[in-house]
Image (cartoon, coloured by chain):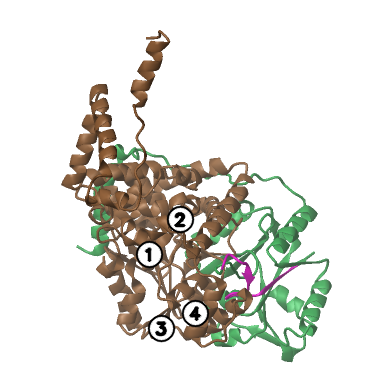
């Protein structure tokens, strides 16, 4: 994994990028409103399907079977696709996948690359790699295009530029594309259409992600609304599919279920505008499929974590998450934001780097309730918290251990608890006389008055009350 | 060892934990029904298809006969939006365009380039099936030109017969799956559900962001 891919050094989540937690900014109000709208819309559409819970359960079982047979499905997919003239490649990590894309680009003398939306290429930081090699990458999904022009990262899995207002997009297009300013949605879309049309026609290569790789038929399934994936994959002479190994499903006959689920959970549609079932390269075209591991097989070494590989990247858990709504996607430090990001990121980049992420949750359970493949995200988070405090991670420091050991001791019996509470009351009373703000506690004492301590504790009040009434 | 074998070995070493993960001895799950088949009649299917497609800002256009469909094409060409049309060379489209002047009609062959197809104001294609409950067109595209005819021209006209309307995706699935399985299949099968759309700026819906702004579906019969 390339290091500049990650902003996680020491887990950014609880550092400077968490400002949104405390300081409401207009930018995140856009986000919170949009998430609320999406979440309600998706729930209404799901509620209109009587069998929706049965679909989720069926999808969960199919994903479970897929992961349990991942090796066989990979081999089956490979042989089906090879028979149609597709080149199937395997990359152990992001760097290897980038080398493969570059090799293919050089082999076909590619000057520019049009890209459909793909989270895997975000993992690879493919755009940087292409730019460094003198090849121009162009994101074609409108949201990704905006984010790329602004040289930012996507803030959401499905709607990457959710934090931009139309006026901001207008200014961006004016500055980067030399277009007259407009804050009108249709005009902005038309500007993007005009510029991107030229890019499709000129590009030597198209790169896409893949929503499902179907093993028994050898089919690459891509879903989208804009038509940009269709154009990116059909126009240039070369199409490269990048896909995580966990995207395999065993049978094409399962697809109607997943298409129904993904569209409803992702964007609240019955079906997305375009569902591409790609069979093989059309005459005169080349098709490559690059399977990426990049840490996914590490998840298999942790038996309790396997279901985190079920994720179909719909974004429903983001929209439902009260933490995500407040802080936005960048706070998660890497490619995958929201509750599922707090699960996937520690697995893929390592708990030593991202061990704080699983703690960035109130464990309210909303994410688990909306997940279309029924990943038990709250328990996945709890499991990762356990690992984070027991393995090398930012959450496993001598001070953390000492603090929690003291806490566990104090909670271990009524006398100890009483003693601890006495000490706390005393501490709170005395704190205002402290001439300095000690360590991490200072973050609290510097800006806030401590609460007034009642004259006696609840326990002593309760005992007194009972003895006065003559009760035991 | 190749990367392929390394990854397969990593997977197999992980899968050795299947019992601990609760993933051991799983049987292949049955294919879920998804949507029940209610056996709706043809007029009901046509009206459902039309309703759904209208909700997506598509233009469902029932035509009792091929003559009606011809009139629709003539109207479209008179409306000023398209001086010419490009057609894939398929028998129903030969029939449909029998009265269109030869100098206003292009037959898009497999060797047409993207640059040529991009110049067409409208592209006419055929559907393999229509899906009533989502307002979708199932279109099989074996060549690059056939694929591009779905996405490049600003107006996409899809022609289908009324008996091709299936209730929903599961009801239309068998032939789609067959194409996916066939060893000689190339290109793609695409499900088109309304004109190209985006809501990427402030969640406001805009049509025709990259693909067609108008999707006209002529349902004949």
Q: Secondary structure at mark 1?
A: helix
Name the residue tied to disc 4.
Answer: A172
- Measure the alpha-carbon separation of dots 4 and 1: 26 Å
User: In the image, which residues are magenta?
Assistant: B202-218
Chain B rendering hue: green
Find out whether residue B207 is within the magenta segment.
Answer: yes
Distance (Cα) linking label 2 and label 4: 25 Å
The lab-note entry on whether marks 4 and 1 share a chain reads yes
Secondary structure at numbered mark 4: helix
Q: Measured along the vertical axis of the image, is residue A61 above or below residue A106?
A: above
Q: Quadrant of residue A334?
A: bottom left
- Residue at image position (28%, 38%) is A429
Disc 3 or disc 2, which is closer to the eye?
2
- How would you rate the neighbour count of disc 1 (Cα within 10 Å): few for under 14, some for 14-19, many for 20 or more? many
Q: Which residue is mark 2?
A: A326
Give residue A457's position: percent from left, percent from top: 34, 27
């Amino acid at each position: 994994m390339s290091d500049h891919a990650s902003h996680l050094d020491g887990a950014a989540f609880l550092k400077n990028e968490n400002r949104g937690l405390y300081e409401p900014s207009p930018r995140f109000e856009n986000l919170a409103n949009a998430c609320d709208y999406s979440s309600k819309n998706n729930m209404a559409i799901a509620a209109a399907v009587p069998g929706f819970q049965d679909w989720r359960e069926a999808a969960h079982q199919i994903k479970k079977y897929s992961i349990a047979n991942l090796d066989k499905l990979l081999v089956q997919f490979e042989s089906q696709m090879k028979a149609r003239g597709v080149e199937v490649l395997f990359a152990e990590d992001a760097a290897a996948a980038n080398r493969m894309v570059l090799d293919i680009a050089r082999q076909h003398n590619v000057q520019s690359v049009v890209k459909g939306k793909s989270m895997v290429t975000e993992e690879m930081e493919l755009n940087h790699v292409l730019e460094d090699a003198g090849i121009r990458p162009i994101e074609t999904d409108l949201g990704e295009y905006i984010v790329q022009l602004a040289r930012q990262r996507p803030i959401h899995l499905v709607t990457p530029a959710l934090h931009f207002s139309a006026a901001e997009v207008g200014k961006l297009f004016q500055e980067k594309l030399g277009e007259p300013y407009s804050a009108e949605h249709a005009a902005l879309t038309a500007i993007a259409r005009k510029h991107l049309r030229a890019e499709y026609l000129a590009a030597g290569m198209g790169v896409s992600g893949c929503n499902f790789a179907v093993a028994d038929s050898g089919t690459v399934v891509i879903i989208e609304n804009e038509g940009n994936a269709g154009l990116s994959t059909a126009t240039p002479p070369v199409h490269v599919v990048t896909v995580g190994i966990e995207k395999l499903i065993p049978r094409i006959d399962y697809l109607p279920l997943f298409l129904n689920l993904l569209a409803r959970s992702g964007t609240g549609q019955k079906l997305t505008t375009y569902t591409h079932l790609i069979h093989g390269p059309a005459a005169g075209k080349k098709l490559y499929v690059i399977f990426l591991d990049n840490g996914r097989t590490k998840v298999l070494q942790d038996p309790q974590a396997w279901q985190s590989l079920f994720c179909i990247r719909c974004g429903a858990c983001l929209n439902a998450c009260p933490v995500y709504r407040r802080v936005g996607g960048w706070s998660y430090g890497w490619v995958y934001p929201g509750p599922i990001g707090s699960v996937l990121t520690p697995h893929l980049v390592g708990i030593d780097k991202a061990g704080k992420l699983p703690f960035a949750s109130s464990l309210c359970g909303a994410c688990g309730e909306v997940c279309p493949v029924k990943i038990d995200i709250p328990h996945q988070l709890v499991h990762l918290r356990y690992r984070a405090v027991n393995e090398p991670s930012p959450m496993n420091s001598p001070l953390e251990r000492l603090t929690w050991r003291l806490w566990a001791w104090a909670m271990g019996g009524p006398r100890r608890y009483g003693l601890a509470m006495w000490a706390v009351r005393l501490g709170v009373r005395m704190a205002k006389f402290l001439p300095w703000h000690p360590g991490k506690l200072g973050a609290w004492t510097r800006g806030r008055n401590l609460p007034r301590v009642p004259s006696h504790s609840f326990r002593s009040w309760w005992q007194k009350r009972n003895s006065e009434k003559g009760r035991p | 060892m190749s990367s392929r074998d390394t990854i397969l070995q990593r997977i197999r070493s992980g899968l050795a934990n299947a019992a601990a993960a609760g993933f051991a001895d799983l049987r292949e799950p049955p294919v879920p029904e998804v949507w029940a088949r209610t056996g709706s009649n043809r007029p009901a299917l046509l009206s459902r298809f039309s309703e759904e497609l209208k909700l997506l800002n598509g233009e469902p256009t029932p035509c009792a006969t091929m003559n009606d469909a011809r009139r629709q094409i003539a109207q479209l060409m008179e409306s000023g939006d398209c001086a010419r049309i490009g057609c894939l060379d398929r028998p129903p489209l030969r029939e449909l365009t029998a009265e269109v002047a030869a100098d206003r009609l292009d037959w898009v062959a497999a060797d047409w380039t993207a640059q040529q197809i991009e110049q067409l104001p409208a592209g006419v294609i055929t559907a393999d099936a229509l899906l009533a409950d989502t307002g979708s067109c199932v279109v099989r595209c074996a060549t690059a030109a056939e694929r591009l005819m779905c996405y490049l021209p600003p107006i996409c006209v899809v022609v289908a017969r009324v008996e091709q309307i299936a209730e929903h995706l599961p009801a239309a699935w068998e032939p789609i799956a067959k194409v996916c399985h066939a060893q000689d299949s190339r290109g793609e099968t695409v499900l088109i559900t309304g004109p190209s759309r985006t809501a990427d700026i402030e969640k406001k819906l805009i049509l025709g962001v990259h693909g067609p702004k108008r999707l006209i579906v002529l349902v004949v019969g």
